[in-house]
Amino acid sequence: MLRGTRILPLLLLLTTTATAQPYTLLIRNGYCIDPASNRRDTLDIAIRDNRIARIAKHIDPHQAKGRLDARGMIVCPGLIDIHTHVFFAPDSATANATADSDLEYAGGPEALHPDSFSFRSGVTTVVDAGSSGWRNFPTFKARVIDHSQTRVLAFLNIVAAGMRGNHYEQDTLDMNGALTATVARRYAKDIVGIKVAHYLGTSWHPVDAAVSAGTMVHIPVMVDFGEHLPPMPIRQLFEQHLRPHDIFTHCFAQLEDREPIVDPTTGHLKPFVKIAQRNGIVFDVGFGEISFALSQAIPAIKAGFLPNSVSTDLHKGATHDMLDILSQFLAMGVDLPTVIAMATSNPAREIGRPRLGSLREGRPADIAILQLEKADFEASDNLGQTITGGQKLICIWTIKDGRLVYSRNRPGL
């Protein structure tokens, strides 16, 4: 009895404390934009451990151990960047990097560490777009996925060696749909799709092999369709080779080795592009280094065509983060809720992870707290065309799995 008497007061204390402060973090007074639930309102969001516990007009701040005042700010789901390259070299984070240049994106110097760019731009989930194939995916998982604070998912390249460049990405004998599907199935928690990229030939085999793998595992294919001279027809790609829910990335590219969606001569969006989107083809920005042209984006938007998702294609040569790109879309006349949807609920749906990209009770507490600042800026594309804007999105706080992982010089908690 003596032992029980000693334990009882401790249990009562713990119960009382948990009841008094049931939430680990409370975000107060923020303007919530959640396209997944069509919610736009000033609300409080309470977090318990790594989940959203409650959303309401007012939640008693004394119920939370930590508090963030988001008055005048935008509270939205953590952003999802579905086109990145993060299979970085083992020593790429040190001053004495020894990356094998022959590996390029597949564990070489072209890739970036995901934690180096994600949280400061409100991104909580990135998807590596085909840097690894079935042969080296286990290395990518062990090096990057399992050790990053950022949630890292992957498109598995149809090329077994991944994006190693040179002749590796041209070897059609190394593009095996069955083996790719086997690895995608084995690592289903991490792999969300199949990727095709950088093929210089005129065979449809890379696309068809990727689609066969995607069909076996019921996941989408992302196609970086270019580098063909003469360019291969994108209408044929959309109508004869891809399936609904497959993803056409770099959709606003204007390069000599790929057919653009806007006719450069007339400035008109090609009619079959809208039809393809209505039939389920997904159009992703994949901004990149030279893969975004204002001469494509502006007339397409004016014609009523919007991409389904915005992504960065971040790698060593590409430096625009998600908020830079979203701010450009605001400058092109896209409204804020639509811009948020293209970086949250839409990409979550595209990669088959609908529990991400939304602010709902019980969902993972991945949250970006942004501010829309008045700020003049000018951005130019690789063709020399410029656009000006008067407002920019900046990240104030980022929360990943209920934990504050980034703060822009603001006191919190």
Image: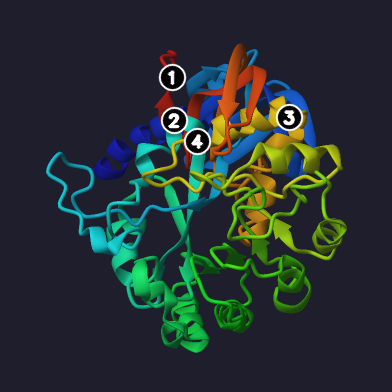
Q: Which of marks 2 and 3 is nearer the N terminus?
A: 2
Q: Which mark is residue 171?
A: none
Three-letter amino acid code at the position of disc 2: Arg
Could you tell me which residue is drawn at 41 percent across and 46 percent down?
150
Q: In this view, does 332 lie to the left or right of 108?
A: right
Residue 41, placed above or below residue 311: above
In this rendering, the label closer to the viewer, 3 or 4: 3
Quick one: quadrant of the N terminus?
top left
Disc 3 marks which residue? 332
Mark 3: give few (<14), some (14-19) or many (20+) Cα within 10 Å.
some
| Element type where label 3 sits in the image | loop
Q: Do the residues labelled 2 and 3 touch (CB within 8 Å)?
A: no
Disc 4 marks which residue? 321
Residue 331, placed above or below residue 107: above
| Element type where label 1 sits in the image | loop
Between 352 and 252, the residue placed more toward the observer is 252
Mark 2: give few (<14), some (14-19) or many (20+) Cα within 10 Å.
many
Three-letter amino acid code at the position of disc 4: Asp
Q: Which mark is residue 120?
A: 2
How are the colours assigned in the image?
A: rainbow
Q: Do the residues labelled 4 and 2 touch (CB within 8 Å)?
A: yes
In this rendering, the label closer to the viewer, 1 or 4: 4
Q: Are marks 2 and 1 in contact (CB under 8 Å)?
A: yes
Three-letter amino acid code at the position of disc 1: Arg
Could you tell me which residue is drawn at 63 percent across and 62 percent down?
352
